[in-house]
Image (spheres, rainbow, N blue to C red):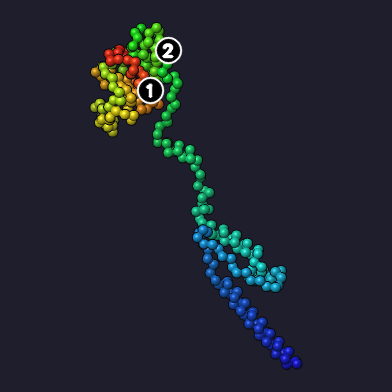
Amino acid sequence: MSNRIHLALLAGASLLSSGLQQTAANEAGFVTEPIVLYADQSAVTPVAAPVRTASAERSNMGGGLIEFLFGDGQNQGDRYRQQGAYQQQPYYQSQRSLVPQMDPQQFMRQQDMGEPARPAFDPKYEKQIVDYPGKEGPGTIVVDTPNKFLYLVQGNGKALRYGIGVGRPGFTWSGIKQISAKKEWPDWTPPPEMLVRRPDLPRHMEGGPQNPLGARAMYLGSSLYRIHGSNEPWTIGTNVSSGCIRMRNEDVIDLYGRVNVGAKVVVI
């Protein structure tokens, strides 16, 4: 009997030694296995390590690698997944918060920064009936260059007043002219003097909404000056032209219908 017990103990010891050697080999293999970290979370889905269980209590495992291998995997798996999610976060996502999000309206404002600011139209330049104490007779056009107003004398001490744009410094003038011609949606041919200053201008432009002479033009005598419309209504009330008197298109159309060729024009 004692021999049998002795042989059984020797066999058990051999099996235990073989199991411990295999366990040690497994642990060594686990440690030496390379760890792969993925940069793109969307491309690679982390796979949790297989969970091995044992009947021993977790408190007796001693923690570390043995606890990871033989524990229930609940807490360790959570830590593994949290660490994996952090390591696999794409780099561009971590940097995205550093890029300020621009408001669409702010973006549009920046896109328009290349254009000069366009002031709102001043209501005082709207067409209106005003008192006129001057001596010119009805049907006379009076251009008040310093104050940027054009008057069409009505008689009985009244006049229609329009806002206008006038010549830049060095291009203003004064005198008495007559309307020598009237044209609707006139063509525009810049004079040679203007082309010297602005060689980028077209040599000729057909009439239309983009034409700088606007919807109507009234030519002043034999000069190059005109009373005309404008495709830049925000310039009314400013010194902007090369000597012409410019009006908003709606105002020049109104004036055009009220005066005839031969009407007197007084520029002061």
In the foreground, 66 or 43: 43
Going from the N terminus, do you reach mark 2 or mark 1 first? Answer: 2
* Residue occupying image coordinates x 35% and y 18%: 255
* Residue occupying image coordinates x 73% and y 89%: 5
Per the rendering, the mark at residue 250 is 1
* Residue occupying image coordinates x 50% and y 55%: 91
Give the SS element for disc 2.
Answer: strand
Q: Is residue 171 visible?
A: no
Mark 2 Cα shell of 10 Å, populated few (<14), some (14-19), many (≥20): some
Can you say which quadrant of the picture contains the N terminus?
bottom right
Q: Position of residue 249 (x, y in %)?
A: 36, 24
Instruction: Please tell me in which quadrant of the rendered image residue 231 appears.
Output: top left
Q: CA distance from mark 2 to mark 1?
A: 19 Å
Give the SS element for disc 1.
Answer: helix
Residue 67 versus residue 20 in the image, above or below: above
Q: Which residue is mark 2?
A: 130
Q: Position of residue 224 (x, y in %)?
A: 26, 21
Residue 90 versus residue 160 in the image, above or below: below
In the foreground, 111 or 161: 161
Q: Is residue 237 visible?
A: yes
Q: Position of residue 21 (x, y in %)?
A: 62, 80
* Residue occupying image coordinates x 34% and y 8%: 137
In the image, farthest residue toward the right: 1
Amino acid tagged 2:
Val
Q: Is residue 56 left or right of residue 106?
A: right
